[in-house]
Image: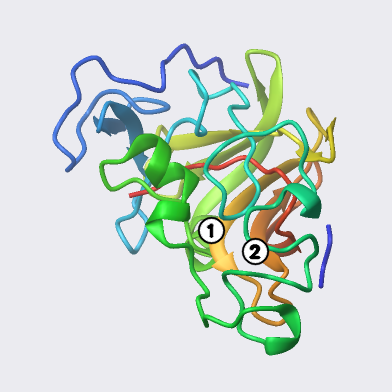
């Protein structure tokens, strides 16, 4: 398994949310809208998927927000197999999201149920964590650049159709054990897709100042940030 500068003065929430079809205001720029009191941007992707302007737990696009183990919906102090919800103490004794009997209980689930999706549980209203394929779609159909927003480093993903439509993903790092590592230099965002070859892992997107890897994988007990879609 593979292991691992434009100022935005905008809130992640909209006081007067527009219909879910989008609009001309809000979002991370001038080409978004709001639904469920959360701002989004229509980047003109082939699927029509709408990307939120902020992470779960964040109040602005540059805020890191909260960190979640894959399939968990609450933050915690220690991110480890010993505290992971869907195993009995280790990654080879899984209790949910597993396709191989030598890794624990088999249920053949490969995508997060909504009740285990931090984006859906936190925001509701049809919001969810993007699949690995949806992260790939974002990467394939936008232009991305390393930049800073409010002195926070991260990557901006810009629509290929309208350059004033974009989202900013802060490089929030990751949590493992009780430590936060890579904040300001590494971005790690969960997908909702299990890494089927080794089900103790899940797909995520990784980026730094040099590159983006839209379909990487890592251990499910790590704490990564979540960017909702709908």
The residue carrying pointer 1 sits among few (fewer than 14), some (14 to 19) or many (20 or more) residues within 10 Å by Cα, namely: many
Check disc 2 and report its element: helix, strand or loop: strand
Q: Residue 135 carries which label?
A: 1
101 is higher (above) or lower (below) than 140: below
Q: Quadrant of residue 121?
A: top left
Residue at image position (61%, 84%) is 99
Residue at image position (63%, 53%) is 85
13 is higher (above) or lower (below) than 225: above
- Given residues 160 and 151, the one toward you in this image is 151
The residue carrying pointer 2 sits among few (fewer than 14), some (14 to 19) or many (20 or more) residues within 10 Å by Cα, namely: many
- Given residues 104 and 150, the one toward you in this image is 104
Q: Which mark is residue 51?
A: none
**Residue 119 point in image, percent of width and height:** 44, 43
Upstream in sequence: badge 2 or badge 1: 1
Check disc 1 and report its element: helix, strand or loop: helix
Q: Residue furthest left?
A: 19
8 is higher (above) or lower (below) than 186: above
Say which residue label 2 marks: 203
Q: Quadrant of residue 165?
A: top left
Q: Left or right: 116 with respect to 67? A: left
Separation of disc 2 and disc 1 at Cα? 10 Å
């Amino acid at each position: 398994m593979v292991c691992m500068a434009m100022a935005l003065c905008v809130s992640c929430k909209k006081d007067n949310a527009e219909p879910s079809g989008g609009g001309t205001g809000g979002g991370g720029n001038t080409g978004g809208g709001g639904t469920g009191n959360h701002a989004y941007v229509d980047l003109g992707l082939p699927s029509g998927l709408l990307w939120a302007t902020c992470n779960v737990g964040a109040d602005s696009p540059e805020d890191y927000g909260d960190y979640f183990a894959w399939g968990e919906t609450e933050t915690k102090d220690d991110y480890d197999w010993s505290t992971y919800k869907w195993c009995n103490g280790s990654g080879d004794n899984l209790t949910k999201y597993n396709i191989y009997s030598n890794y624990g209980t088999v249920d053949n689930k490969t995508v997060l149920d909504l009740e285990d999706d931090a984006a859906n549980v936190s925001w509701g209203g049809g919001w969810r964590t993007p699949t690995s394929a949806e992260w790939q779609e974002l990467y394939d159909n936008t232009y991305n650049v390393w930049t800073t927003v409010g002195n926070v480093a991260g990557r901006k993903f810009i629509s290929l159709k309208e350059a004033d439509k974009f989202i900013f993903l802060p490089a929030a790092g990751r949590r493992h054990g009780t430590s936060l590592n890579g904040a300001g230099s590494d971005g790690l965002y969960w997908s909702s897709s299990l890494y089927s070859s080794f089900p103790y892992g899940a797909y995520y997107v990784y980026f730094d100042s040099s590159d983006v890897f839209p379909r990487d994988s890592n251990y499910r007990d790590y704490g990564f940030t979540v960017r909702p879609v709908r």
